[in-house]
Image (tube, rainbow, N blue to C red):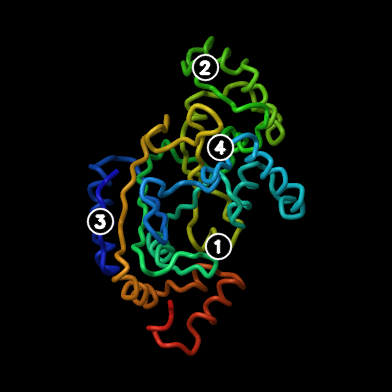
């Protein structure tokens, strides 16, 4: 991981991003795109960790049970979803733990999220915030309908065993690939995939399952469209009880840098974002966002906005 970059204004932030754009996160690379994620405090090594990887949710079949219970209890919400990835995206939207991580192509949106005091959060203003900057090669970017996305997404509903593939070969030679897809665990994963893609053949690659991909979703949600949202979709690290990490990722390298906003600079940067039109009602273009906007801003002085 790159060193921290401290900022004290929006101008500082843009200067750091200009450096990344010109020289890369850790040196120049071609065919890469920057994605951003704002977090209200610095979680250290666990920064940028999907919710499903916390508090033991990957143990046993808890992930698949969670998914199926959401499907069962909110069947009307999932009625318009044709793929498991779409269902995971919907779950993520409503705050359910998944193997997805929200990121954005909009750097200012992510800075807003780093500084946003979510009424549902217990994180206060007495800590530093961070923007995570991911440098992702185009070969690790997929659209929502991708077959690789289907493979990793359906790990979330797999409940046959721990899906331990450490003993299986990662060779791409035809004989080894055939043997990999003939393993009982992989056959059960294929069964789940074919529930959404009946034509799907036995061509799963081990390295794909142990990778992290950036996925561009359908822009069918006002928030996703407004926030230029995307997701990091995490595969496994050896078996289903461990998520892939940036270090274990078998796909194209994803580089990460942190931009830190010291707590003493938060008020100033919030005021600057407000001048740029980055307010809660534009970031959340729905009733919740508009309600939060009026509760937060109407009839208050700038110093009272974020108390």
Q: Earlier in the sequence, mark 4 or mark 2?
A: 4
Q: Are marks 1 and 3 in contact (CB under 8 Å)?
A: no
Q: Secondary structure at mark 4?
A: helix
Q: Nearer the viewer, residue 91 or 251?
A: 91
Residue 185 coordinates in the image, percent (x, y): 63, 22
Q: Residue at x 40, y 67 (%)?
A: 115
Q: Secondary structure at mark 3?
A: strand
Residue 185, numbered label: none
Q: Nearer the viewer, mark 4 or mark 2?
A: 2
- Where, quadrant-wise, is the C terminus in this rendering? bottom left
Q: CA distance from mark 4 to mark 2?
A: 21 Å
Q: Earlier in the sequence, mark 4 or mark 1?
A: 4
Residue 168, numbered label: 2
Q: CA distance from mark 3 to mark 2?
A: 41 Å
Q: Is residue 281 left or right of residue 108?
A: right
What residue is shown with label 4?
Answer: 149
Q: Is residue 285 above or below residue 76?
A: below
- Where, quadrant-wise, is the N terminus in this rendering? top left
Q: Earlier in the sequence, mark 2 or mark 1?
A: 2
Q: Are marks 4 and 2 in contact (CB under 8 Å)?
A: no
Q: Residue at x 48, y 30 (%)?
A: 237
Q: Residue at x 30, y 68 (%)?
A: 10
Q: CA distance from mark 4 to mark 1?
A: 22 Å
Residue 223, numbered label: 1
Q: Secondary structure at mark 2?
A: loop
Q: Nearer the viewer, residue 266 or 207?
A: 266
What residue is shown with label 3?
Answer: 5
Q: Quadrant of residue 161?
A: top right
């Amino acid at each position: 991981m790159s060193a921290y970059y401290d900022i004290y204004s929006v101008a500082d932030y843009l200067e750091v991003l200009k450096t990344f754009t010109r020289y890369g996160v850790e040196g120049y690379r071609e065919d890469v795109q920057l994605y951003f994620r704002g977090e209200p405090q610095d979680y250290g090594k666990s920064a940028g960790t999907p919710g499903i990887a916390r508090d033991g949710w990957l143990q046993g079949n808890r992930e698949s049970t969670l998914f199926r219970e959401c499907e069962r209890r909110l069947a009307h919400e999932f009625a318009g979803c044709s793929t498991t990835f779409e269902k995971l995206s919907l779950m993520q939207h409503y705050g359910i733990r998944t193997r997805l991580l929200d990121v954005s192509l909009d750097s200012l949106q992510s800075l807003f999220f780093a500084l946003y005091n979510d009424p549902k959060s217990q994180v206060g203003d007495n800590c530093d915030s961070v923007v995570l900057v991911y440098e992702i090669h185009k070969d690790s970017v997929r659209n929502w309908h991708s077959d690789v996305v289907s493979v990793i997404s359906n790990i979330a509903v797999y409940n046959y065993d721990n899906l331990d593939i450490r003993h299986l070969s990662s060779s791409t030679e035809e004989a080894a690939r055939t043997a990999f897809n003939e393993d009982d665990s992989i056959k059960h994963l294929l069964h789940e995939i074919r529930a959404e893609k009946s034509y799907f053949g036995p061509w799963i690659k081990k390295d794909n399952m142990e990778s992290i991909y950036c996925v561009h979703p359908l822009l069918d949600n006002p928030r996703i469209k407004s926030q230029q949202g995307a997701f990091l979709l995490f595969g496994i690290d050896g078996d289903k009880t461990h998520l892939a990490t940036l270090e274990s990722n078998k796909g194209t390298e994803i580089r990460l840098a942190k931009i830190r906003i010291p707590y003493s600079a938060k008020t100033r940067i919030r005021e600057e974002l407000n001048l740029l039109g980055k307010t809660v009602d534009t970031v959340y273009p729905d009733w919740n966002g508009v309600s939060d906007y009026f509760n937060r801003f109407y009839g208050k002085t700038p110093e009272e906005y974020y108390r």
